Image (spheres, rainbow, N blue to C red):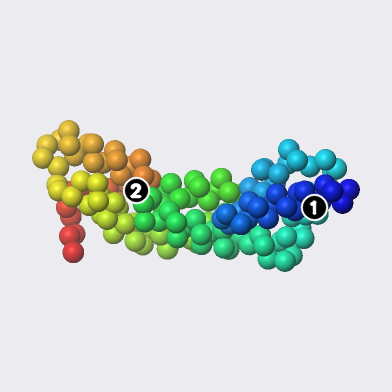
């Protein structure tokens, strides 16, 4: 039993050393290594009690790493995939949506830098931003050049 816990703890700490992980992510990744039923839950409870697993930090980490390149919708999908609380995700997305147009404009500027020459180019730029998870309103404002600073 002790070997299993050390092994699971070691694997969990190795994963946590690279970046923040949610409890649900760690459960998914470590489940194949659980030899004794309940051992993984004990390990994760211990790590959570010691604040090695912190949902708030996971949320902040994802937003910090991804907000410069992705829109709120894409970040929402990523946060949901990590198994975070829906209320915390909703609060984080509210703050992200406030800066959606500015972030979309910066991503657009780095990729294209100039307004579309024709309808084909306009559609290409809009698809690019949509693929990054930006909302339709933000995409239209950026590609049309509306409310330039």
Q: Secondary structure at mark 2?
A: loop
Q: Residue furthest left?
A: 117
Mark pair 2, 1: CA separation: 45 Å
User: Where does the C terminus fall, quadrant-wise?
Assistant: bottom left
At mark 1, the secondary structure is helix
Residue indicated by mark 1: 6
Q: Residues within 10 Å of mark 1 (few under 14, many from 20)?
A: few
The residue mark sitting in front, 2 or 1, is 1
Mark 2 highlights which residue?
135
Classify residue 107 as left or right of residue 62.
Answer: left
Q: Vertically, is 30 above or below 45?
A: above
Percent position (x, y) of residue 93?
A: 45, 57
Q: Residue at x 34, y 61 (%)?
A: 99
- Sequence order check, earlier mark of 2 and 1: 1
Kindly tell me whether residue 113 is visible in this rendering: yes
Query: In the image, 146: left or right of 72?
Result: left
Q: Nearer the viewer, residue 10 or 74?
A: 10
Q: Would you say residue 140 is visible in this rendering?
A: no
Q: Is residue 43 above or below residue 122?
A: below
Displayed quadrant of residue 43: bottom right
């Amino acid at each position: 039993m002790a070997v299993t816990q050390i092994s699971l703890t070691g694997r969990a700490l190795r994963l946590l050393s690279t970046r923040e992980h949610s409890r649900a992510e760690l459960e998914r990744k470590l489940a194949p290594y659980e030899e004794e039923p309940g051992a993984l839950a004990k390990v994760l409870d211990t790590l959570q009690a010691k604040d090695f697993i912190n949902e708030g930090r996971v949320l902040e980490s994802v937003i910090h790493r991804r907000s410069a390149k992705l829109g709120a919708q894409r970040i929402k999908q990523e946060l949901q995939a990590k198994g975070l609380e829906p209320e915390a995700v909703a609060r984080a997305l509210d703050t992200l949506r406030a800066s959606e147009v500015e972030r979309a404009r910066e991503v657009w500027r780095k990729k294209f830098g100039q307004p579309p020459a024709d309808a084909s180019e306009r559609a290409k730029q809009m698809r690019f931003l949509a693929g990054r998870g930006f909302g339709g309103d933000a995409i239209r404002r950026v590609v049309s050049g509306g409310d330039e600073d």
